[in-house]
Amino acid sequence: MSYEFHAHFSFALQDGTVQAFALQWLAGETQELPKRWGNLRLLRDPTARLAVLAQAMITPQLERARSGTRTQAGGYRLWVGRDAAAFLARQRTTMQQLGLEPSLPDLATLPPGAWALRLTFTLSKPYLSRDDRLFHLLENPVKKEWVFDVPYVAPSGWKGALRAALRQMRGYTTLEQEASDSQMVRLFGNVRGDEEAFCAGFVQFFPTFFDRLGLEVINPHDREKGVGARGPILLECVPAGAQGALMLLYVPTGTAVDAQQSADDLVVVAQGIQAMLSTYGFGAKTSSGFGIAADDLVDGEIRIATQTLSLKGKRLSNLAAEVEHWLKTAL
């Protein structure tokens, strides 16, 4: 289907003059349609326009489509800076109206020992990831939800980041070390390569959606010469200041779990979240400091049995200690 779309709106096959005028309309620089390509009026959705603009990656118009000119912002950079926030806000509103954004379930319907966590955080460093779509103007577009085109962290991304944080906290360097840790297996399931002893983890993750987009520029240097190896690289990101909600659910399956074991698992997960968001980061290029959250939490809650701990106004750096202290009175 995507190939048919690009074949119908073949930006790359237009002559240079039409491309130049079409580029301005597709990026929102002008409201005037190119006179020799009036069929573009069928593209009413901004994501459809940007999908066609992405064909500029195989034309001489690439840098113009990405950033505009040296003297004037334009192209995709202009759209991100001027129009993306309003577009994403509308998309998020539609998703909420349709009931497509996740919410914590009623624990009364779940097995004994279940608990749930929701934590609304603010990014202090941009979040980077890698999308898997076919065409994009940038080499490193941030991952987006397929239908609404909203940047997000997939559940699998959260699982991998939290698992990696706990693995680093415990000093594990091999899969065998993690496989011998019954708590890690209980939380996340068996390690890769051990499919014969398959078991699903008790922790289930929800997607996190953002309503802001930004651009970062990096300039990798040659280690020997100390100069830029290939010139500046434009990266799409979720910028610092954006807010997101991390949500997860702990559901014992296939085996009985007593209250103390469930509480111990909650404390460990809180420790891992604290380390992941404040130290190790999540997403791509975490070793360069990306994917870190601010210490002040916006909102959130933890539910276990009939008890609820509010996280509004709490500090991320105190999360594990707050949870441990609360459990002593909640259980």
Image (cartoon, rainbow, N blue to C red):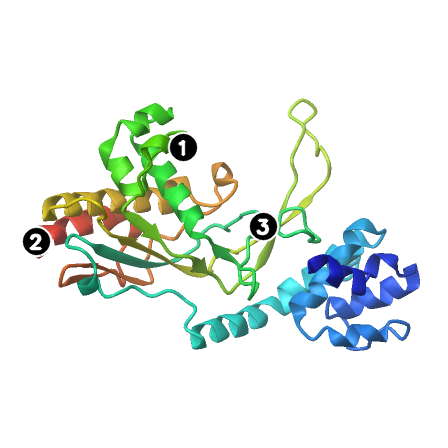
Q: Which residue is mark 1?
A: 192
Q: Earlier in the sequence, mark 1 or mark 2?
A: 1
**Which of the labelled discs sits on residue 331, or is there none?**
2
Helix, strand or loop for disc 1 = loop
Lower sequence index among marks 3 and 2: 3
Number of residues whose C-alpha sits closer than 10 Å to that of mark 3, classed few (under 14), some (14–19) or many (20 or more):
some
Horizontal relation, residue 312 to residue 242: left or right: left
Among numbered discs 3 and 1, the one appearing first in the sequence:
3
Left or right of residue 66, residue 308 in this image: left
Q: Amino acid at mark 1?
A: Arg
> Measured from the top left, where is residue 267 in percent x and y?
20, 45
Look at the numbered disc 3 and give the secondary structure of its residue: loop
Q: Nearer the viewer, residue 193 or 203?
A: 193
Amino acid type, callout 3: Asp
Residue under label 3, please give it.
131
Residue occupying the point 37% across, 30% down: 194
Q: Nearer the viewer, mark 1 or mark 2?
A: 1
Going 86% across and 63% down the picture, which residue do you hit? 20
Q: Position of residue 315 (x, y in %)?
A: 28, 54
Q: Amino acid at mark 2?
A: Leu
Q: Nearer the viewer, residue 317 or 46?
A: 46
Task: Indicate the quadrant where residue 223 lies.
Answer: top right
Categorize mark 1 by other alpha carbons within 10 Å: few (<14), some (14-19), many (20+): few
- Which residue: 8% across, 50% down? 328
